[in-house]
Structures are given as structure tokens and as C-alpha cells.
């Protein structure tokens, strides 16, 4: 049975694999695949967009683990009707990627700066939040 002891960053951790115990620093890459899948995201900055137009960016979701990752995205605040995602959920295979498209539509917005958050949840922990910024001119 494989087991990783819980430890704080900077401490020596132990891992038991088929009865053998291995000691290593808590920052060691051997911990990367324990505890389930993890998602990697990137911040989104739409820059300046003219009022009355739209712009689409890709958000690359990366699963760097050896297990499938299921995800769901929601937009906050909930009344953010200027931002949309082309798919709201999916499954990323082990060591795979997906690239949902995120669109900012400025047709109902006035000049100014707008912010929102993409909240990703699924079979990974912790949940990921992606800051989104848009400037309307």
C-alpha cells in the first residue's frame, strides 16, 4: 500500500511504497501525484476593448498528474453577464490539457474597468480562481 505522511513545506516527509519507507524533503517532486489531480490555470487580461465589440481568449487547463481531472467553472459575481465560457465543464485525461474559450462582450457596458473571477472546482483541491480583467473604451 502506498502512503504519504502529511508534512509542512521544508520538513522531511516519508512515503511508504510496498513496505519500503523513503525520506525526502517536502518540496520533492515525488509528492506531485499524491492527493489527487491538480489543475493549473493562467490569469486572463483582455486589455482594452472598444465598447460594442467582443474579444475571445483561451484559458489553458493543465492536468499534470497521473489521474483524470473533472472540472466545472462558474463566473463570479453571478451578475457578470459580459463574460462567458464556451464550455462549463469537462474531463482532462492524465497529463493532458483542455482550452475552453472565454469571451468578453462589451455591447452592454460603458467605459471603465471590469473585473470578474472564473471559479474552477472538481475532483482536485484546492479550487482554482482565475482573475479576469477588462477595460472598455
Image (cartoon, grey):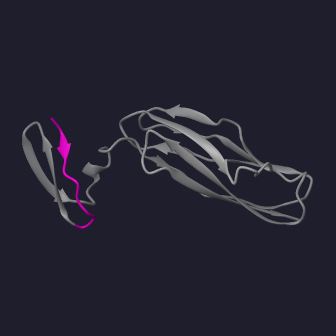
On the image, the x and y values in percent for residue 118 come to: 63, 51
Q: Do we see residue 42 in this rendering?
A: no
Q: Is residue 10 left or right of residue 16?
A: right
Q: Do we see residue 58 in this rendering?
A: yes
Magenta part of the chain: 1-10
Q: Residue at x 64, y 40 (%)?
A: 100
On the image, the x and y values in percent for residue 112 come to: 84, 67
Depth check: give the residue in front, 57 or 26: 26
Q: Residue at x 47, y 37 (%)?
A: 96
Q: Quadrant of the C terminus?
A: bottom right
Q: Is residue 71 left or right of residue 67?
A: right
Magenta stretch: residue 4 in it?
A: yes
Q: Quadrant of the N terminus?
A: top left
On the image, the x and y values in percent for residue 14 come to: 15, 53
On the image, the x and y values in percent for residue 6 come to: 23, 54
Q: Residue at x 23, y 59 (%)?
A: 7
Amino acid at each position: 500500500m502506498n502512503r504519504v505522511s502529511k508534512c509542512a513545506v521544508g520538513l522531511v516527509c516519508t512515503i511508504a511504497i510496498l513496505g519500503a519507507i523513503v525520506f525526502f524533503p517536502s518540496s520533492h517532486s515525488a509528492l506531485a501525484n499524491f492527493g489527487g489531480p491538480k489543475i493549473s490555470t493562467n490569469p486572463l487580461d483582455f486589455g482594452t476593448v472598444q465598447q460594442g465589440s467582443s474579444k475571445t481568449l483561451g484559458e489553458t487547463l493543465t492536468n499534470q498528474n497521473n489521474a483524470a481531472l473533472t472540472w466545472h467553472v462558474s463566473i463570479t459575481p453571478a451578475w457578470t453577464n459580459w463574460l462567458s465560457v464556451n464550455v462549463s465543464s469537462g474531463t482532462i485525461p492524465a497529463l493532458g490539457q483542455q482550452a475552453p474559450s472565454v469571451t468578453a462582450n462589451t455591447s452592454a457596458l460603458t467605459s471603465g474597468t471590469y473585473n470578474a473571477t472564473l471559479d474552477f472546482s472538481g475532483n482536485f483541491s484546492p479550487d482554482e480562481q482565475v482573475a479576469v480583467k477588462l477595460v472598455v473604451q
